[in-house]
Structures are given as C-alpha cells and as structure tokens.
Amino acid sequence: MTTSPDSPAAAGGQKRDAQQIRAAMRELAALIRRANLAYHQKDAPEISDAEYDAAKRRLLALEERHPDLKLPDSPTRDIGAPPREGFAKVTHEVPMLSLGNAFADDEVHEFDERIRKFLGLGDKVVTYTAEPKIDGLSLSVRYENGRMRVAATRGDGVTGEDVTANARTICDLPQTLDGAPDLLEVRGEVYMSHPDFEALNRVQAEAGAAPFANPRNAAAGSLRQLDPEITRARPLRFFAYAWGALSAPLADTQMGAINRLAALGFQTNPLTRLCRGTQELLAHYRHIEARRAELDYDIDGVVYKVDDLDLQRRLGFRSTTPRWAIAHKFPAETVWTRLEKIDIQVGRTGALSPVARLKPVTVGGVVVSNATLHNEDYIRGFDSRGNVIRDGKDIREGDWVKVYRAGDVIPKVADVDLSRRPPDARPFDFPTRCPECGSDAIREEGDAVRRCTGGMACPAQAMERLKHFVSRGAFDIEGLGARQVEMFYNDADLPIREPADIFTLRARDARNLTRLKNRDGWGEKSAENLFRAIEERRRIPLYRMIYALGIRHVGEAASKLLASHYGSWEAFETAMTRAQPGEGAEWEELINIDGVGAVMARSLIAAFHQENERRLIDRLVDQIEVLDAKQPPAADSPIAGKTLVFTGTLERMTRAEAKARAEALGARVAGSVSARTDLVIAGPGAGSKARKAAELGVEVIDEDAWLALAEGA
DNA sequence: TATCCTCGAGTTCC
DNA sequence: CTCGAGGATA
C-alpha cells in the first residue's frame, strides 16, 4: 500500500489537534459550570473572579477560532449567568439617553427635515456638529467644585455602575478642574487605542491569558475590573463629547461647549466639525469614512447634533432619544455562511417565529449560529401587500446567506446567493400547524405572524406564558427563572403547569416523599430559598399582577395605566367581567383611558370571558393577595378627582409630562371629551375635541393657564 | 386617511 | 435592536 509521505500524518495531526481542543473546551466548561453553581447557591466561590473571567475568556477565544468544535451545551451561551461584580449602583441625575440611527443618506435628509419642520424654520439652513462615533463605552464623570467625585457607566440610561476608582486611573480624565462650574458632569467615551490594544493582547498571551476579541471588549473588561490596580495597567483613553447635570451653562452652542471642555483639560475629538446643512454633513461623513482606516481607534459612524443649544432645548426628547441628534452608522460587517436549517419557535402568544440555524461564523468578534427570520413573508421575499424584500429572493434551507448583526447585536439575514443555491433546494414550506402541539396555525387578515390556536393546551405557549409570569416586570421571583420554569414544567413529582401551581409548590413539596431538598443540585438551603422567594411575592402590586397575566397587547405600560385607573383588583376584575365588547358603560370607561384602544379592550375582555383563561386567573387569585394601586393623595389640589383632556400641541411640556403632572395632582387624564370631562387643556392646533368641549359646555383653558394651575398646586 | 410616535413582542449573545 | 401594530392626532 502506497501513501504520499505526509498527508495521512497531517490529517492525523489535525484530528489530534481537534481532540485536544475539544478536551480543553470541556475542561474549561466544567470549571465555569462548577463556579456558576457555587455562586448560585451562595456558597464560598471555588475560584476567584479573575480566574473565572480568564477561564471564560479562554473558552470564548477557543470557540471563536474553532466555531465548528463549540460544545452544544457550552456555558458561554448561558443566559442569565449571574453578574459577579460588586459595583454600587448610581442613578444619573440627567439620564444618559441613546441616539436614533440613520443608515442611508435619505435618513439624514429626513432627520434635517424633521428638525426644520418641528421648529418651523422653513427653508432656513440648520447648523450641526459632526463628529466620529467612538466604539467604546460611555461614561459620566461628575465633578463638584472642580474635583472628580463619581464616575458611572451608562447602565440602562437611568442607573449605572459606580466605577470611580477605575476612572481615576484614566490619564485623559483630569482629577481636578480649574474654572469649571461648581457642578459639572462630563460625558464621553472610554476606549482603547489600536497600539495599546495590541500591546495588551501580547502581554495577555505571554501571561497565558486569552486575548481580547477587540478593543471595545478590552476597554469594557478593563473599566469593569474590581481591582483598580488592574485598570491602571490598562491604557484607557477618553473623549469628552457631552454633559449631564450642570450648575451653569458651558456655552450657548454645542461646538462652544466642546471647546470649553477642551479648555478645561479634556480630550475632544479632532475630527469634530461644524456643518451647515445636510450636504456638508454628508461630505464630512465621507471624509471621516475615508480616514477610518488611518485612525488608531475604532469608530462605528458619525454623530450629528444641532449646534444651537437653545434649539436643542426646544426640540427636546422623544421617549428614549433626543430629537436634536442622530448617529449616522457605517454599514455593518457582513459575512457569508450556509443556512443549514430553518426551525420554528412558538412564543407566548402562539406566534410561530422562524429561526435560521447557521454554520457558525464570526461576525464582528462574536460567533453567530442563529439568526431571526422574522416571519413567513420575510422568508418568502415579499409580503401580502406585494412589497418586495431582498429583491424578492426567498430563503431556502441549504442556501448561502449574507449575515450581519443589526445594530451590532441581533443577527439577521440580509441577502441570498442564488448562484450557490443547491439544485435540490425547495422553497420553505411554512407550517400551517403548530410544530409543538399540532393545532392549526392561522394568520389573521392583514397580520404578518401566524399563530398557533392551541392556547394553553399548547405546551410551548403554556411554558412561555409561565416564563413571562415570573419575568422581571411581572412576579420576578428570585431563583425561579426561565430555566427553572422549564424544569418544573416537566417535573413528574412537583409540576408547575400554571401560575397558581407556583404558590402551591411548598405545600405540595411538604406532602411529597421525594422532597425537593433531597434532589441532585438542590439542598435544604436552596429549596428553602426558593420557597421563601415565592412567599415574598404572594402579596403583589396590582400593575405587576395585570402585566403577569400576559394578555395580548397588554404590556408593562398598559398594565400601569389600568392599575392606576381601577385602583384595586376587585374593581378591575369586576369591570372586565361586566364589560361587553363595543357597548355599555364598562366598555366606554375602558376605551376612554388614554392609551387604551378598541383592540386592547377587546383583548382584555376576551381574557376574562374565555373559560379556561378565566379559571387560570381565578385559581391564581385564590393563592395570592393583590395590593391596591397607590392613589395619588394630593386631595387639596384644585384638579384633584377631576377628569382632564389634553388636545392640540403642548409647547412647554410633553404630553407624557403633562399627564404625569396632572395625575400627580390627583386628576385623571382621559383621551377624549365626554360629558364626564371637567376640563380641557387646548394647545395650538386643537380641533374636534375643543369644539366638542364647547358643545358640551366643558371649561377649556390654554397651556399657560394650565401651567399656572399646576404650579399653584 | 395618513402620519407620527410609543409600546409590545420576539430575537441573539454577553 | 427591530419590526409591526395600536393609539392619538391632524
């Protein structure tokens, strides 16, 4: 038998390598899992945070280099792995908002038009600042009387983490300021330069530690070290570009404020320019894009801001973003890979969601193996109204597809390579029966999603409903997350199949021969902790209860509206039980709540009238105590107990603000004028509502009078 | 009826 | 983070 001298040996070497890598992966995975378990059960951790982080990074790095060898049950894909840090929480005095995005030139034109329209500027040219968007992490640094006091990460925008000790090691951040306002919160981006990043990874490699995937991860990992001495050894940099709380204005333009920050000793980005109108904005965008490769730090787009701070103030904010700024993003990195299979998941509302199972690839430093396919139409390539998606190309199992991470997070399929389509590939046959329970899956007229009709008889829906029930905004039971729900759902001795079962768990366990505390992975302490966490939630605020029911169209915001309107579970339940869709006093009351429309109202009524659904609710209510919503007391305000309606444009405050203010003063805010309305506040452009108020003889006041009323109270 | 805005639901990976 | 739908308004 003749073989070429080296090929079998080489193949054998590769195989051995793969085995060694697999073995290393298994060992690291076991180490991480043991540490997670120890942490969960609040025992003394077996390994230090640093060792844990190093193990996790090493495993991630291995997986990144060898996506094909990744263990199917790798702990790196654990959701809800516990945070291991002990940073204090900091509430931002001024929230750190995110920015709206633009990807194409015409979105920049729309941004500019929106602004001119909002301000009534006609064809006048607006001046903007344009600056690179640094790909790091944002930080807010608070100076009081010229001294650095607190530095906090963005967090969720409202609450961040206190990383002051680490921030003090960043040389771009002055410890003291000369000539600054008494109170100054400087905001900007912490980042790591390319040379520093490469040097750091060399040091990591020499020390046998896993390298960081990219400068952004390196910066984030360094800033969130518990030991500031480690952070000190990491060369972090900082660009200032914004501010939070201030005791005195910095300037009257954005550019002026940036220059002032520079004068105070902060680094500001040298590519920041003033641009008059969209043409200059786009020109500067292309200039920055062209120079992107020469910069020694990562950027992911260009930020545009209205320069005049007075105009910024007038433009104000939408719920999560300022109207006066936008991030013009560079195109996301895309990668071609094979789509191996299309799976269908069933959500809590019965929605069938297609998911692409991909041959794992690294996109933007992360291994991606799944991507959302949204719905039937997205796979088909055009929707029911005949709109074309991806030039009308459909997606088939076996196709080569172009994948990117939308907003650098959610993997999506952007394109299909028809030239590489396997000859035997067939158009995807979207199921018309639920893959979990076999019930019919139907698509309502005009709806994009197909839904399983099985209701609570569908195990997938029942399980997802339970997961929602214990989720953060709902009952939020410590130690009973998605994974535990799945475990208990299929448990032979101690099943949780519906919400009420959670609250009978302890009693059932006590009657059992196979006690929870005797099981693998459980002990007396962990079982007792779970039972205690459940008991703590037996008394539950009304809005959490309503939200937990998981009624379609009724999310967190709507639940709060309903809770504060009805005040008690009894009142709410009675109203929902008596209400008839489309008629009667209870219906009128329901849809008159500002923010509740006919669709939501019907959905609520259906939930309380559908027999099985209703029994679930009743059995749950038997087990718990629903606390009344706190009624705003403010009994002595002139509008307490009155029903108000806002109409037209409010110029001095947003509608949400006005509403919150009115409610704080004990008034109810309704959406439309009726005989039960006491007062209408009409801004400019008020139409039918103001007329109706006049017809009904309801008092109408303008915004100034309303402000006087609110201030006086 | 069209348009703007916010909310709900579903998704991935850390 | 994104899409689609619901709700408010012009």
Image (spheres, coloured by chain):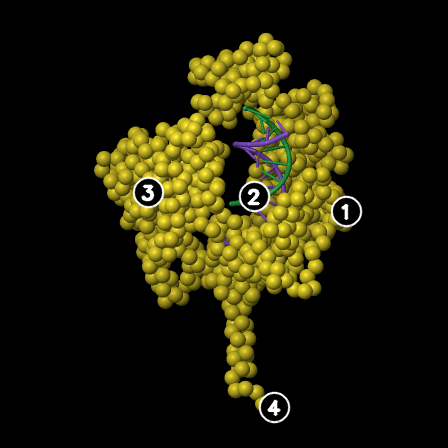
Chain colours: A yellow, B purple, C green
Viewer-proximal residue among A472 and A529: A472
Q: Which mark is residue A298?
A: none
Marks 2 and 1, the one that precedes in the sequence? 1
Q: Residue at x 39, y 37 (%)?
A: A277
Query: Image check: A220 left or right of A490?
Result: left
Residue type pointed to by label 3: Arg
Q: Which label lies toward us, 4 or 3? A: 3
Q: CA distance from mark 4 to mark 2?
A: 66 Å
The residue that mark 4 highlights is A1
Neighbour tally class for label 1: few under 14, some 14-19, many 20 plus, Cα within 10 Å: some
Residue at the limit of the structure toward the left, as seen here: A178
The residue that mark 2 highlights is A478
User: SS at mark 2?
Assistant: loop
Marks 2 and 3, the one that precedes in the sequence? 3
Q: Are marks 4 and 2 on the same chain?
A: yes
**Residue A495 in picture, x, y percent from top left:** 70, 47
Dot 3: chain letter: A
Residue A532, quarter of picture = top right
Q: CA distance from mark 4 to mark 3?
A: 73 Å
Q: CA distance from mark 4 to mark 1?
A: 60 Å
Does residue A558 sit above or below A392 in this rendering? above
Residue type pointed to by label 1: Ser
Q: Which label lies toward us, 2 or 3? A: 3
The residue that mark 3 highlights is A273
Q: Residue at x 36, y 64 (%)?
A: A202
Query: Image check: A356 left or right of A121?
Result: right
